[in-house]
Image (spheres, rainbow, N blue to C red):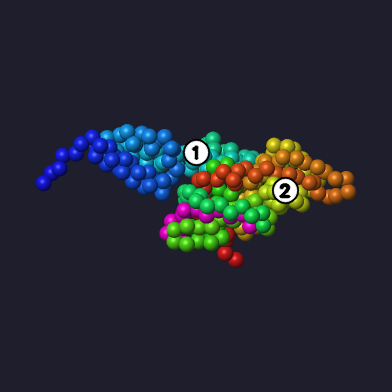
Amino acid sequence: MRVPLNSKALTTLSLAAASTALVVLDSTGRIEARALLVLANTPAYKLSSFIKELEQGQEMRAELAERLARRSMLLGRAEQYKRENDALRALQGYGIVTPYELTYARVFERRAETWLATAAVGAGRRDGVAAGMPVVGIDGLVGRVTRVTPTAAEVELITSERVRVAAAHAATGAVGVYYADADGGGHMAHLPRTAEVKVGDLVVTAGTSRLYPPGLIVGYVRAVDRPFDSMFAEVEVAPAENMAALENVFVVNWLPPKK
């Protein structure tokens, strides 16, 4: 037997549907608070189309973030190989082709201890992620996958004090070692004091180690000092990525070559 619904019952059903929709959507991505007001005042028969629009918005944001990450990787490669014009020829004559495949993942947890800074991301073994793969954001290098489960992965960030990255001054090709201090600030050691480094210059992965491929943006030179009693310059580097604000990352489908 069908029971007629009064306006109060319809409102209750609408709010219940709205709450359910919010729970489902929040498990896959962040949703703005104002959506609650919209859903609460939306008739039940319109909720499905509204939810579909929100899901499409999530997909569009993920696609935009991936495009920005690819732009960042291209910039790093173009700067690093500018002296030989290889990247410029590729960009101008043969179209834009990124060197690696990327797997999108959302960050759902961060651990900010200075000795071991990590992030947990929502992509794992079933998505093709493996331990040792680099991880980038929309602006540059984030870190490296250290542990993997079927559905998630742990990433050690380059702001960890124990991390070392073989890095290069993109404009000159001078190679050094990037590391972070206790405050998460970046430095570049073993860079010759004669290297023509200036504030604002780009620092990229050098590719001389087995941990990272060449050309990933690490950061930008923030300060340079050349002590008269040292063979090396003292270079401060601002990481390209703001680790405290990470929401979206991309695992680079690259593994160190086997010996």
Q: Which of 214 and 112 is in front in this view?
A: 112
Q: Give residue 219's position: percent from left, percent from top.
A: 65, 43
Q: Residue 187 carries which label?
A: 2
Q: In this view, does 67 lie to the left or right of 113?
A: left
**Amino acid on which the number 2 mark rests in the picture:** His
Residue denoted by label 1: 95
User: Which residue is at the far right?
Assistant: 229
Indicate the quadrant containing the C terminus: top left, top right, bottom left or bottom right. bottom right
Q: Which residue is drawn at 65% across and 44% down?
A: 239
Q: What stretch is highlighted in magenta?
A: 116-128
Of badges 2 and 1, the one in the foreground is 2
User: Is any part of residue 46 visible from this angle?
Assistant: no
Q: Is mark 1 on a helix, strand or loop?
A: loop
- The outermost residue toward the bottom is 259
Q: Residue at x 11, y 46 (%)?
A: 1
On the rendered structure, is 226 left or right of 77? right
Residue 12, compared with residue 251, is above or below; it is above
How far apart marks 2 and 1 lie (CA) works out to 35 Å
Q: Residue at x 49, y 41 (%)?
A: 65
Magenta residue check for 5: no
In the picture provided, is 78 more to the left or to the right than 192? left
Nearer to us in this view, 243 or 102: 243
Q: Residue 108 or 215: which is nearer the viewer?
A: 108
